[in-house]
Amino acid sequence: MTRRRWIMLVVVVLLVGGWFAWKASHKPVPGSQYKTAEVTRGDLSEVITANGVLNPVRVVSVGTQVSGTVDKLYVDFNSRVTQGQLLLELDPSVYAARVAASEASLANIRSAAALQSANSRRSAELFKQNYISRQDYETAQASAAGTAAQVHAAEAQVKQDRTNLGYTVIRSPVSGVVIARSVDLGQTVAASFTTPELFKIARDLTKMQIEAAVAEADVAKVRVGQRVDFTVDAYGSRGFTGTVAQVRLNPVSQQNVVTYTVIVSVANPDGALLPGMTANASFLISNHSNSLLLPNAALSWKPTDYKPPSRVPGNHSPADPSMLTVFVLRDAAPQAVRIKIGASDQDNSEVMSGPLKAGDKVIIADTSKDKKTGANFGPPGTGPNRK
């Protein structure tokens, strides 16, 4: 064998030995492929979240019963008004002409009624003296009664026309702030089958309410009087507080998603909250102090070969469906533990019973390349492996 071949053989032997040496020195620590989280003790607040729109508690829509052109406009957006204050006037010329015509018609009918009444009295005297027939007498009486009825009808028409003329002047029905104006000078308002809306007046902007859409899965936890914390995008992290005032029984279904409207009363003494703002609300369901807290991610992870128990070990009774299985890392291997959980938030769940204790390392993921990790992490009930 030549010297060159001996050198190549030595190099190969050294490379192979070096590889085995490196492999031995970098042998993975047992259990290092598992990502774990620690079971701790702490405080937990159970909340449900919902979005809603801020609105004044009382909003009055001001409309008109007659059509016409806007002749005078006295208020604008954000104007403060008092009850009875003049808001708008429509052009009254058409309705004034109708009043004049109906009054003239009434005067004409009253003249005819006076004549028929005199004829009725004369026919009565002539009938007593047998100068006219009963038929002529009754005809005169009927004519007098008919013209008297026409007088009442004409008077009613005059009253109606005067009322319509009065409707051309729009006054505020309540005291408050104008938050919407739908007309402008010169605009024609048509009151046909529906009453057109001219203004919206908020009675008191220091008292607001949130109309929050709560999912049907959460609405059973909402009670009147519950505290509600919320934020609005306009003020960033500034927090506001309200109280549940009403849970409306009318469900709203959109794309097969059912929600219920929950009214939250909100005090707005400084006027910071404006109508139409979107509120991100959190309904406080319960507070739990010094609870044993399990990371929600541990509820999702299961070994690939894990099979949920159908019966309690050492017993022929079926497994309790309320008990969940999590895996604790003990002796570098996952060990199944059956627990029951209670309240939850976005990160943790309260452990109600089971052999877990503070400081235990629960497995939340498998970082090895040849093994699959668990399902999506999330609150209890969101993963496919809850048993």
Image: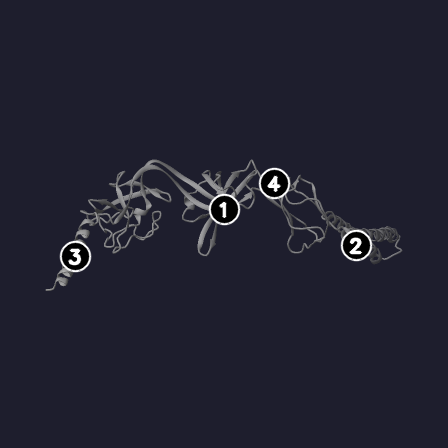
Q: Choose between 348 and 286: the one closer to the eye.
A: 348
Residue under label 1, please give it: 52
Q: Is residue 382 above or below residue 80?
A: below
> Which amino acid type corresponds to the residue marked 3 in the rendered image?
Val
Separation (CA) of disc 2 from disc 4: 51 Å
Separation (CA) of disc 3 from disc 1: 68 Å
Label located before the other in sequence (3 or 1): 3
Separation (CA) of disc 2 from disc 1: 63 Å
Q: Position of residue 308 (x, y in %)?
A: 24, 52
> Which amino acid type corresponds to the residue marked 4 in the rendered image?
Arg
> Which amino acid type corresponds to the residue marked 2 in the rendered image?
Gly
Mark nearest the camera among 2 and 4 is: 4
Q: Residue at x 54, y 37 (%)?
A: 268
Q: Position of residue 133 (x, y in %)?
A: 85, 57
Residue under label 3, please give it: 16
Label located before the other in sequence (1 or 4): 1
Query: Which mark is on residue 209?
Result: none
Mark nearest the camera among 3 and 1 is: 3
Query: Which mark is on residue 146?
Result: 2
Mark nearest the camera among 1 and 4 is: 1
Q: Secondary structure at mark 3?
A: helix
Label located before the other in sequence (4 or 3): 3
Residue under label 4, please give it: 203
Q: Would residue 149 be visible to someone looking at this image? A: no
> Which amino acid type corresponds to the residue marked 1 in the rendered image?
Gly
CB contact under 8 Å: marks 2 and 3: no
Mark nearest the camera among 4 and 3 is: 3
Label located before the other in sequence (2 or 3): 3
